[in-house]
Amino acid sequence: MDRERLAALHGVDTTYRPGPDREVRVPEETVVAVLAALGVDASTPQAVRDALAAYEHRDRQRLLAPCTVVREGRPLPLGLPEGTRVLIEAESGEVFDDGGWERLPLGRHVVRATAPDGRTARADLVIAPERLPGPAGRTFGFMAQLYSTLSDRSWGMGDLGDLADLAAWSGRALGAGFLQINPLHIAVPGRPTDPSPYRPSSRRFPDPVYLRVEDVPEYAYLAADDRVRAHELAGRAAALRAGVLHKDALIDRDAVWELKLEALRLVRKVPLQPGRRAEYADFLAEQGQALDDHATWCALAEVNGPDWHAWPAGLRDPRSPQVARARGELLDRVDFYCWLTWLTDHQLCAAQAAARAAGMPIGIVHDLAVGVHPSGSDAWAMQDALARGMSVGAPPDAFNSRGQDWGLPPWRPDALAATGYTPYRDLLSRLLRHAGALRIDHVMGLFRLWWVPEGRPPTEGAYVRYDAEAMLGVLALEAHRAGAVVIGEDLGTVEPGVREELADRGVLGTSVLWFERDHDGDGKPLAPEEWRPACLATVTTHDLPSTAARLTGEHVELRYRLGLLTRPLAQEQAEDTAEVAEWIALLGRLGLLPEGAADEEAVVKAVHRFLARTPAAMVGVWLPDAVGDRRPQNLPGTWDQYPNWRLPVADAAGRPVTLEQLAGSPRLYALLDEVRAALAPEGAPSASITAGREGAGG
């Protein structure tokens, strides 16, 4: 019982529920390992007693919690002894002395307290908005994987030039309000590089593989010999692009980056003009230690390999004298990676500016992955904030009896609080720099995460709780400052009360058509008016089959060919057919499928008409669905059996489609006509975008 009490004090659950009617006890060894990762020894009964005594002693002696996060206008829950003198230094420099707390502005402040017995304390105080900003009105937009959206100008994969162009076109020509993309976090370098955007080296910095090299201003001023070489590299890039578009080649990030890297080294020879140099200097000053650490890791990885755990011992600590010396020796390489980050940030800014200039009320929706690769830049630079020897995953449930281990080290909740949530706040502010909205993958992780000790199966993990009020408060503050909407991916197992709390704070949920059923009733598909309004509604996602494949059952056959089915093929097919038939019947009853179910394109239109009939604040159209693509971008449960994250957008016949062809696709325009018309306010004119477009191709 003492160990359970100690675990509870540190936010570690000793039981979990894989289903509503079953409770499972966490193994003792897991509890001990998780507590050890939090700096608490619970290995023996005596160690547990000592840890409890130490906790109680600290609690008695502590005057202030390390960080308090409170909503604007609410009382400060400081819990101080009577007679304690309190002084609050606001972020602006204003001082509040013993009163006027209700006037405290939004922001991060410092509390200083002096108790009557002479004890003193300093702590962080965050005043957060009551709610996050939401969309100004109902809107629709595309959801796309940027790497898969190639143009006639990109070097073998979609880039930031394509992002700006896709945003400008969809905003101006289609009236789209947003464009949601995959995480652009920088990957861990390797041969091959892990193509998943959800296991990055750093979530704080973007990947320069997405740079449009020709859009770097200095590219226009290459020396004659370098211009010839850059032209040769562009020719090789054109061959890569042609392979993907016309020869069934997969997107090869490593080959793309090899070409871009050489071209960028040529560009770096061109001196920055005074204004650009001053801008770069400002960027370095603004980014500070975080960018210096990241660039240092990149430079060290060139020499020592991408796994910092295997580096010489002195280089594993970013604050060691050896790292300081190596940084000096590799100064040019460190500056090169800082420069790449600046260039990428510049093009991200241009993409959001293009989106807003095109009339998008939201613009680019960036995506925040759950965590980072344990060998990467963030894991090296932020060792004190991440739990060593732990990985984030998911417990066993009705869909996966073995649980999941995602291989991502989790935040330490105690370390976040001790630093005033600085690492988390810094991450959010960087992602929101050029975002109109932020999607948070597995948003339930703001409340609790399933920690899996190294060397143990996912079934032997434990939930560790976070201060959700603090996590949501910091998120609300940073989103407020950026004027950004926040969308939480809340699919799968969600603890009771979490969706309600997220909605109360203004975080939009994610509602996927195939999952929206009356789970507490007859299990039938939810009628459109029963959907929650505070959500991004979509038919499918990057982890699910395309709508065309879902309608025809091709996704079941694909999983069968890859050996992923856990039941007989006939049983899976029968269940899938029945599920689709239920939805088609509902579409028919609602009058949303006048063309009949035999026309696949008509059914794709009908499910989007259905989404528009819901009260959802945002309606997302999966870009591949707009041209009839039948392949998923990612097939969970596979690694080398399927080309995850390496496929271009393709049409119904499997032919890759360029951005230019997307902009001339009759099928795409016909679908978006339906979405726009269905979302138009009653009585408002909704001119056909199909009729109004110019130069539409086949």
Image (tube, rainbow, N blue to C red):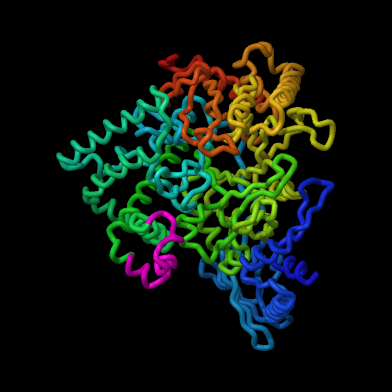
Residue 283 visible at all? no
Q: In which quarter of the image is the C terminus?
A: top left
Q: Quadrant of the N terminus?
A: bottom right
Which residue is most to the left? 224
Which residue is most to the bottom? 117
Residue at 42% of width from left, 26% of height from top?
Answer: 659
Q: Does the magenta stretch include residue 310?
A: yes
Image-based side of 222 in relation to 584, left or right: left
The residue closer to the viewer here, 59 or 91, is 59
Image-based side of 153 in relation to 353, left or right: left
Q: Position of residue 209 (x, y in %)?
A: 38, 42
Residue 239 visible at all? yes
Position above or below: 494 against 511: below
Position above or below: 666 against 633: above
Q: Where is residue 170 in the image (x, y as percent from the top left)?
A: 48, 28
Residue at 49% of width from left, 59% of height from top?
Answer: 379
**Which residues make up the magenta segment?**
305-326
